[in-house]
Amino acid sequence: MFVSEAFAQTAAPAAGSTDMLISIAPFVVVFAIMYFLIIRPQRRQLKSREDMLKNIRRGDTVVTGGGIIARVTKVMDNGELEVQISEQVRVRVLQSMVTEVRVKGEPAAANAK
């Protein structure tokens, strides 16, 4: 009877190392899921937004954070844009407040057939 108890005590530490791996595995799996579903897409979206803001040129039509649709007349080095809202109205807007850059469309005469 004493021999079997001694054998059982020596086998217990080997099982403890696998128990530690099994207890850490869910944390690794949860982190991997969060990385691929949350962190990675946000980084990709942030990079595409930075590229969009960096590539704003004169003549582009932009939409600001306030919902104003305007045409860019001048891009300044200090992170500002001069935009034209109507014929005689030009305002300065922070480049970071641009939410969308719309693609230049074809002239109205080309669309009407």
Image (cartoon, rainbow, N blue to C red):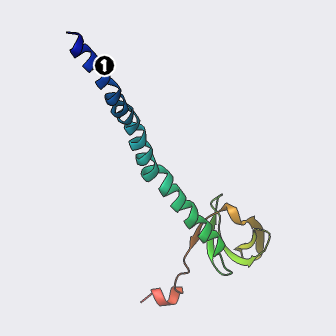
Extreme-left residue of the structure: 1
- Determine whether, in the image, residue 108 is placed left or right of residue 15: right
Residue 64 appears at what percent x and percent y?
Answer: 65, 63
Q: Amino acid at mark 1?
A: Gln
Q: Is residue 8 left or right of residue 75?
A: left
Q: Is residue 19 above or below residue 112?
A: above
Residue at the top extreme of this rendering: 1
Q: Residue at x 65, y 72 (%)?
A: 54
Judge left or right: residue 27 versus residue 89.
Answer: left
Q: Based on the displayed image, in which of its 4 quarters is residue 101 positioned?
A: bottom right
SS at mark 1 in the image: helix
Rendered-image quadrant of the N terminus: top left
Above or below: residue 42 compared with residue 47? above
Location of the C terminus (image quadrant): bottom left
Q: Which residue is under mark 1?
A: 9
The x and y percentages for residue 76 are: 78, 74
Q: Is residue 40 above or below residue 110?
A: above
Where does residue 60 sit, x and y in percent of width and height? 63, 78
* 67 lies above or below 71: above
Which of the pair 58/44 is nearer the observer?
44
Residue 90: give x, y in percent of width and height. Answer: 77, 72
Left or right: residue 59 versus residue 22 is right
Residue at 35% of width from left, 30% of height from top?
A: 19
Q: How many marks?
A: 1
**Residue sticking out furthest to the right:** 78
In depth, the one of 48 and 60 nearer the eye is 48
Q: Which of 19 and 33 lies nearest the eye of the viewer?
A: 19
The local crowd at label 1, few if under 14, some if 14 to 19, many if 20 or more residues have their Cα within 10 Å, is few
